[in-house]
Amino acid sequence: MIKNIKINSKSKKNKHPISFDEAVLVDSLLGTVPQRTREVLSRRFWLDARTKSETLESIGSSMNITRERVRQIEHAGIEIIRESNIFARAKSSFEELRMCVLKEGGIMREDHLLAILSDTQKGRNNFRFLLVVGGAFFRERESDDFYARWHVDERTAKAVHNALAGLYESLPAEEVLSEHDILNRFLKELTNVNDAYRDEEILKRWISMSKRISKNPLNEWARATSSLIRVKGIRDYAYMVVKRANKPMHFSEVTSEIVRLFSKKAHVATTHNELIKDKRFVLVGRGLYALAEWGYRPGVVRDVIADILKKEGPLNKEEILKQVQKMRFVKTNTVIVNLSDNRFFTCGKDGLYNLVQK
């Protein structure tokens, strides 16, 4: 069981946790810098009517100055803002913003944090600017392992990063965990973290910072490289369906489950063709497919019998029937007919069948 976890309805529903008007505050702060500096900051942080933020290079090119000069203007502008009276008077607003980040976990992905702060692009741009200017907020750049993220608590941030590394190492290469199980496993990795952060929504947001851990459409978690996570087409949806069922399935049933579970358009004929072509699936009966990873091997009944005799040596009819019917959903008579083919199998006086020696 997950201990110390409670559903925090506020973290789910509260899209406007800040009481002050971020647009008014941003405009006031920009009013403390020279016009050219204001233009640079507005273009860099997408604070005006432009369609997107701009790079140092593009701004420098349009203003006929170097990339480095643009960077210097941006840096100097932020310092001017931080030293202004307006910034000092906005102390309570920045503290409210800091407390909001703390309440939501102390560290979280940039896109998730901005989505909590505002439901408009302009609002998110304003808040990102305030996070940069605020001084109490620290941004971790995107890397191969993590998405860009913000934190206000160095100790918690370090603990979460270490826990995510431990969680990843604990995950099998090709196995999915339910949301309940991965949260439990993550909790075991977390140390020196305030109990107030042991909240289901916070834990899921922390896990989502990792690029190496992800979930599939069924809300199952695994390493991001797992074939159970990287769903690209009908074959992968079919694989997830059969894996989830943990038993052989008819291709028509697989099709129905793809539609039901994933709300994807799937045609019986198309699904059947994909199952035939994918080596992860093995035909084990009339239209029935199992996973090769379960120990099933491709081939007709004769091939299955041959594989069993190669592995086990001479066997009587009953033992062969028992083992074949673990691997194929076929009638007893079908197995007997194949055993009677003296081109491949021979039966000794002791009633034991063996392969014909060639």
Image: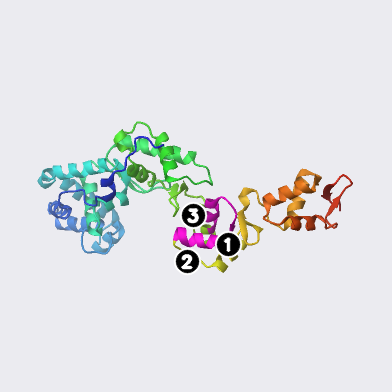
Disc 3 + disc 1, Cβ < 8 Å: no
Disc 1 target residue = 251
Is 97 on the left or on the right of 240, as rendered? left
Q: Residue 33: percent from the left, percent from the top?
A: 14, 52
Q: Secondary structure at mark 3?
A: loop
Q: Quadrant of the N terminus?
A: top left
Q: Is residue 233 visible?
A: no
Disc 3 target residue = 230
Q: Amino acid at mark 3?
A: Arg
Q: Residue 240: within the magenta?
A: yes
Q: Nearer the viewer, mark 2 or mark 3?
A: 2
Against 100, residue 340 (above or below) is below
Give the residue displayed 62% in from the left and 48% down from the top: 294
Give the residue displayed 48% in from the left and 52% down from the top: 229
Tell me the magenta residue range: 238-262
Q: Which mark is residue 265?
A: 2
Query: Is disc 3 surrounded by few (<14), some (14 to 19) or many (20+) residues within 10 Å?
Result: some
